[in-house]
Image (spheres, helix red, strand yellow):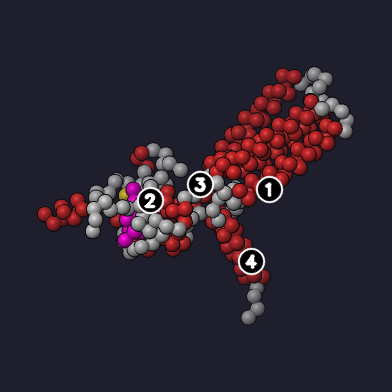
């Protein structure tokens, strides 16, 4: 399922956060009560989850929802960290 | 503690939904198998609709139709299993992505059915007063339309449901994030 337009694409850090915590897609899916295939779609930016699912995923990672999902592409973390160190 | 009727109903409903959810969560058969079943279903609708035109003998026509209808029933059951009841399960037994996909499949199936009905109506209007367009063919067209109406959502789902990657279920703990630089 591809997003209807480029503007509607939702970018996420789910793949990275899941990797950090050593969770498989099936484990994450079970924890937030969705199908494991949906996690793959969300990670690839092919599906924008509902607000309820986005909030559950963010809560599971203990982060605000806008730290996990964004309408703009996330800057690479290394770039973020470097810019914070230099400022 | 005595369970009230409402409580029992809620518990039974929750159990039924949980069972259905387990079924709809199971991996789908490969797409090529689903597509073969969908093609077989569509191929069987043709004989049901056209047998009275081709086979005019009094016994053989209905007999062929009956065989085709029985085969359609068998393929319909197989299609339901192959699509994991996605087109039938209630929303609460499905994941939100599957609900959205299911709704899309129903819309596409409805469009295809509307086209089939329009074609059948055009055929009836065009050749309606000819001798061979009698009750036999009208009944056959009716059966074919019923078969299409009940089977098209399954056919569309069989074609369109995406294959599940093994990675989605078991592995990929790295989340698709791979580091080229050795640690």
Residue at 38% over, 51% down:
A43
Residue B81 locus on image (x, y percent): 63, 50
What distance separates the C-alpha of mark 1 from that of mark 4? 25 Å
User: How busy is the neighbourhood of tag 3: few (under 14 within 10 Å), some, or many (20 plus)?
Assistant: few
Mark pair 3, 2: CA separation: 17 Å
When asked about the image quadrant of residue B20, the answer is bottom right
Label at residue B77: 1
**Residue at the outermost bottom position:** B1
The disc placed on residue B12 is 4
Residue under label 3, please give it.
Answer: B163
- Indicate yes or no whether the magenta region holds residue A13: yes
Pick whichever of labels 1 and 4 is earlier in the sequence: 4
**CB atoms of marks 1 and 4 within 8 Å:** no
Q: Chain of mark 2?
A: A
N-terminal of the pair, mark 3 or mark 1, is 1
**Residue segment shown in magenta:** A11-20
Residue B5 seen by the camera: yes
Q: Secondary structure at mark 1?
A: helix
Pointers 3 and 1 within a single chain: yes
Write the residue at 59% across / 44% down.
B33
Tag 3 secondary structure: loop
Task: Give how far apart the Cα atoms at labels 2 and 4 are.
Answer: 35 Å
Q: Nearer the viewer, mark 3 or mark 2?
A: 3
* Helix, strand or loop under label 2: helix
Q: Is residue B58 above or below residue A21?
A: above
Relative image position of residue A48 (x, y in whole percent): 41, 48
């Amino acid at each position: 399922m591809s997003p209807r337009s480029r503007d509607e694409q939702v970018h996420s850090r789910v793949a990275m956060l899941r990797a950090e915590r050593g969770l498989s897609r099936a484990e994450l899916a079970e924890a937030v009560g969705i199908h494991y295939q949906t996690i793959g779609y969300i990670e690839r930016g092919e599906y924008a989850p509902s607000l309820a699912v986005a909030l559950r995923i963010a809560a599971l990672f203990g982060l605000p929802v806008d730290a996990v999902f964004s309408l703009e592409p996330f800057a690479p973390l290394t770039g973020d960290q470097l810019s914070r160190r230099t400022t | 503690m005595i369970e009230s009727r409402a409580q029992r109903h809620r518990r039974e409903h929750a159990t039924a939904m949980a069972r259905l959810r387990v079924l709809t969560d199971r991996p789908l058969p490969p797409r090529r198998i689903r597509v073969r079943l969908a093609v077989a279903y569509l191929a069987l609708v043709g004989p049901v609709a056209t047998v009275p035109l081709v086979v005019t003998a009094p016994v053989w026509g209905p007999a062929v139709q009956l065989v085709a209808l029985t085969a359609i029933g068998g393929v319909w059951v197989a299609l339901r299993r192959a699509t994991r009841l996605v087109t039938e399960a209630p929303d609460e037994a499905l994941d939100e992505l599957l609900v959205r996909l299911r709704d899309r499949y129903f819309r596409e199936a409805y469009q295809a059915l509307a086209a089939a009905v329009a074609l059948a109506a055009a055929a009836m209007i065009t050749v309606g007063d000819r001798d061979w367009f009698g009750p036999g063919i009208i009944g056959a067209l009716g059966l074919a339309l019923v078969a299409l109406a009940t089977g098209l959502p399954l056919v569309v789902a069989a074609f369109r449901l995406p294959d599940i990657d093994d990675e989605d279920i078991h592995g990929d703990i790295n989340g698709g994030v791979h580091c080229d630089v050795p640690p």
